[in-house]
Image: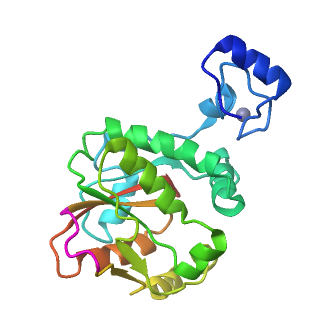
Amino acid sequence: MKKLHSPTLQSLSDLLFPRSCLGCNRYLNFYESTLCITCQIELPQTHFQNTRKNPVFNKLDLLFPIEAATAAFIFQKEGLVAHLIYDFKYKGNHQSGLLLTHYLTIALKESLLFREIEGIVPLPLHHTRKRKRGFNQAEIIGKVIAQKLKIPFYADGLIRLKKTKALAHIGDEDRWNEIKDAFVINSSYKRLPNHLLLVDDVITTGATLSACADALKKNSSLKLSIAALACRL
Ligand SMILES: [Zn+2]
């Protein structure tokens, strides 16, 4: 249930309809919203947006030229962020995704490194996978960031041609072969802005982002920056 503005009304509402924390499931106090204070403190924020040569930038810059890159959180196996992303992607709990996106949006807004972004493109899902899941998580993340930062959003700027295997479960070398040439720019856009922010949920090896960068940079001098909810280091 949505948090109310008046503390008294919120206390009364919490008595009748207790709200629970998305992280630990404990009942929330009237002054808490979505996540309890303990879970909020536990969130492993990176603050990478404050340093250009951060670990995400360094990892991706080896694969393709980028202007800036960040992820709001460290992805720890079985950690709170992993739990929230799982709920978002596989259980369709958009509230969990929106909560993490909120942190990423603030990080991007505060950063000096992302001021030149002219358009946002989400990492696309193959249309059959999107139909099955009902949504593309990167599209939801990108759309919220675009709305809050008032930057044009190109939901279908990139198209995924290949339905790849679940990349999390295959080895590094196979992953690169699987994803190569999987993406193309949507030809219905005559020209995309010159500096794009490519958005994803979790950065792992960077193979998928690299394949997207190849497609976006093909025959163009386009500048690319990257933002994700979380990264595995
Ligand atoms: Zn909690």
Scheme of image coloration: rainbow
In the image, residue 16 lies in the stretch drawn in magenta: no
Q: Please determine whether, in this image, residue 205 is positioned above or below residue 93.
A: below
Please name whichever residue, 84 or 43, is drawn nearer the observer in this view of the structure: 84
Please name whichever residue, 55 or 134, is drawn nearer the observer in this view of the structure: 134
Q: Is there any visible trace of residue 201 in the rendered image?
A: no
Which residue is found at the position 83% from the left and 21% from the top? 15
Residue 32 relative to residue 150: left or right = right
The quadrant of the picture occupied by the N terminus is top right
Q: Please determine whether, in this image, residue 197 is positioned above or below residue 125.
A: above
Residue 177 relative to residue 57: left or right = right
In the image, residue 192 lies in the stretch drawn in magenta: yes
Image coordinates of residue 104 in percent, x first then y, are 45, 44
- Residue 183, picture quadrant: bottom left
Quarter, ligand 1: top right
Q: Residue furthest left?
A: 221
Please name whichever residue, 210 or 5, is drawn nearer the observer in this view of the structure: 5
Identify the magenta region.
188-194
